[in-house]
Amino acid sequence: MIRASERSQGISYAIREVVIPARKLEQRGIKVLHLNIGDPNKYDFDTPQHMKDALLDATNQGYNGYSPSEGEVELRNAIIEREKERNNIDYKLDEICVTTGVTEALQILINALLDPNDELLIPGPTYPQYSLITRFNNANPISYRCIEEEGWQPDVDNIRKNISDKTKGIVIINPNNPTGALYPKNVIKQIIDIAGEYKIPIISDEIYDDMTFDDKQYATSTLGKDISVITFNGFSKVYLVPGWRMGYTLFHHNGELDEVQDAFMRIARSRLCASSICQRACIAALKGPQDHIIEVNNKLRKRRDFSYKRLNEIEGLSTAKPDGAFYIFPKIEAMDNGIWKTDKEFVLDLLNEAHVLVVHGSGFCETYGKNHFRAVILPTLETLEQAFNNLESFMKKRLK
């Protein structure tokens, strides 16, 4: 037998792996209520029509070949205009690279930034790709604590405590996946101060930046103009095109990141380019109507409020209130009763008995995510109500 590589053995992506047992139930004709995946288009959200039209127009107008590796100039200029208008930051064309989603941007950056045994500070809990890709490159993800009792805000003292001479970056995900936390100015500024003190770049994932409910999201680069910030953003969430796989990376610095930026762009050239026709459609996304954003947030706010209230009514569960993105991250208080050994066991039990699919919290961080689960608030209120009713019946039965 030809053996797979040693480093591939550690690959585990919780969000997709829980789908496999759910499929087996569905193959038996059992309806599963999916609260597991952050894809708005799987629910009652749809891509704005002018973007769909632009995609078709791009194919008919002949944009079917390769684009520049860094991205179409017109798209990068549109991103520059957005950043100036929204965040009052001036970017140059060569500081922007369009990628196949934020995941590819992260893969390229980790390859450009980290050597084996280097360390990357990541929120605990975090989007799994940050730890997965870091480990895949033989570097070490180090989780810093986010405080559940404070709405999952970063523990700034814990960030400082975890910095070592091997630390090469501090990751911020704002709004956060999986907790839905939105970071206020003062918290971001405190992290910026630490990064400046230790001369460590911040990697700021802002893919959900315009998906907020009660307060505005502040871009890290806006608040930290004198430090090095590498920002990830894209179109998947705010513009409702996760399947288009369109992301981009922004480099903001005063020369400290010249070598990393150059390495990033060289790696980007080696993988050719992101989708050419989707890039044309994303120009239309940035330059066209933006009113769908308000409509989406209004729907999500109602679903957030319902989910927060309903989950806290269920015995054995508690949850903080999310302020952005479309996730909620409840704590399984009943784990203390010894009914389940792990949160993954809880999730599979819930799936098999109540036919509700969520993702185990330890898949987002074994330390700070355990004994929790992540659910999306994307389904209709009717679907959420049914799912939470099933969940409540399941908990009552188990807590007898």
Image: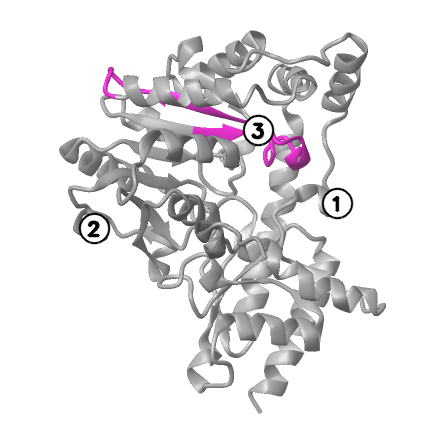
- Other residues around mark 3 within 10 Å, as few (<14) / some (14–19) / many (≥20): some
Q: Which residues are magenta?
A: 232-256
Instruction: Say which of 220 and 351 sits in front.
Output: 351
Measuring from the top left, give residue 391's x and y in whole percent.
Answer: 64, 73
The residue positioned farthest toward the bottom in the image shown: 400
Q: Nearer the viewer, residue 82 or 236?
A: 236
Task: Kindly identify which residue carries mark 2.
Answer: 162
Q: Residue at x 69, y 75 (%)?
A: 352
**Left/right of residue 366 with respect to residue 358 in the rendered view:** left
Q: Are marks 2 and 3 in contact (CB under 8 Å)?
A: no
**Image point (76%, 24%), residue name:** 52
Q: Is residue 57 magenta?
A: no
Depth-wise, is mark 2 or mark 1 nearer the camera? 2
Q: Which mark is residue 44?
A: 1
* Percent position of residue 366, x then y: 39, 63
Q: Earlier in the sequence, mark 2 or mark 3?
A: 3
Question: Mark 1: which secondary structure?
Answer: loop
Which is in the foreground here, disc 1 or disc 3?
3
The front one of 147 and 241 is 241
**Element type where label 3 sits in the image:** loop
Which residue does the image show at 66% across and 71% down from the upper left?
Answer: 351
Q: Amino acid at mark 2?
A: Asn
Q: Can you say which quadrant of the picture contains the N terminus?
A: bottom right
| Pair 2/3: label in front | 3
The residue singled out by tag 3 in the image is 100
Dot placed on the residue nearer the N-terminal end, 2 or 1 = 1
Left or right of 265 in this view: 272: right
Q: Is residue 273 above or below residue 42?
A: above
Instruction: Determine whether 400 is above or below 82 in the image.
Output: below
Left of 182 or right of it: where is 279? Answer: right
Question: What residue is at 54 percent from the left and 57 percent from the top?
Answer: 14
